[in-house]
Image: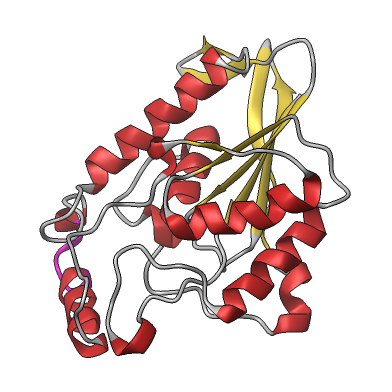
Amino acid sequence: MIELVLVRHAQPDWEPGGRAVDHPELSGHGRRQAEAVADALAGEHFDHFYTSTLQRAVETAEFVARAKNVRFEQCAWLDELRLPPLEGQTSDQVERFFADARARDLEKWWDGAPGGESFRHMYERVTSGLEALLEGQHGLRKHDNSGYRLWHPPALDQRILIVAHEGTNAVILSRLLDIEPVPWTWVRFSSYWAAISRVATVPISDAYAFVLRSFNDWEHLRPLGLPPGGRRG
């Protein structure tokens, strides 16, 4: 069996001092969330650990790394959809930027935010990185049965922990669950900051498929109060 445990990073401080930053650190509340998710995972065994290269994910992973005395490998393919620079803009300017982007026809959503990475490119970046990781480093093999994409897992069970982003984790879930991509994939699998989702392989016919074991688990955050999902991943 292969199990992937996906954690969204904790709450970032997007606008310290009232001005936007492109690569925020965690807020004070976010650090408490990161500590809570580290405590929630402390009793679990994992064989491999990955995080994106972005500060908010790396900082969240550091809480887990200290609690478990492990090291996370940073992977650029796990980075969130790349936005155009918003550094220094006011809250109103940022809100207007995202409101205008959301107001476009859905077909335009494939292009991503104006001036940023297209969602088409991000989807290909994440799925190709995921498949290269699973096949190259973890011994899974893709298997086709009647046009369905299945897998042959390695002989030994493995548990993989990934700390990434709302959009990245949504793409991973869509790919592993073999769900057709749409340009609002991150909305379809929207999760809270520091929430946990799990997928694992189960036998199907002559191979294995990934199934969703749990999604957006935030019980460990309950003592802190349930946060809003967040405007940016």
Q: Which residue lies furthest to the left in this view?
A: 115
Q: Position of residue 43 (x, y in %)?
A: 88, 49
- Total labels drawn: 0
Image quarter where the C terminus lies is bottom left
Q: Position of residue 169 (x, y in %)?
A: 50, 48
Q: Is residue 134 above or below residue 67?
A: above
- Name the dominant secondary structure of the magenta segment: loop
Q: Which colour scheme is used?
A: secondary structure
Residue drawn 40% across the image and 67% down it: 24
Image quarter where the N terminus lies is top right
Question: Taking 23 as reference, is 193 left or right?
Answer: right
Q: Position of residue 87 (x, y in %)?
A: 22, 71
Query: Is residue 176 covered in magenta?
Result: no
Residue drawn 28% across the image and 77% down it: 20
Residue 189 visible from this viewpoint: no
Q: Position of residue 143 (x, y in %)?
A: 54, 11
Residue drawn 63% across the image and 53% down it: 62
Camera-side residue: 155 or 224? 224
Region rendered in magenta: 102-106
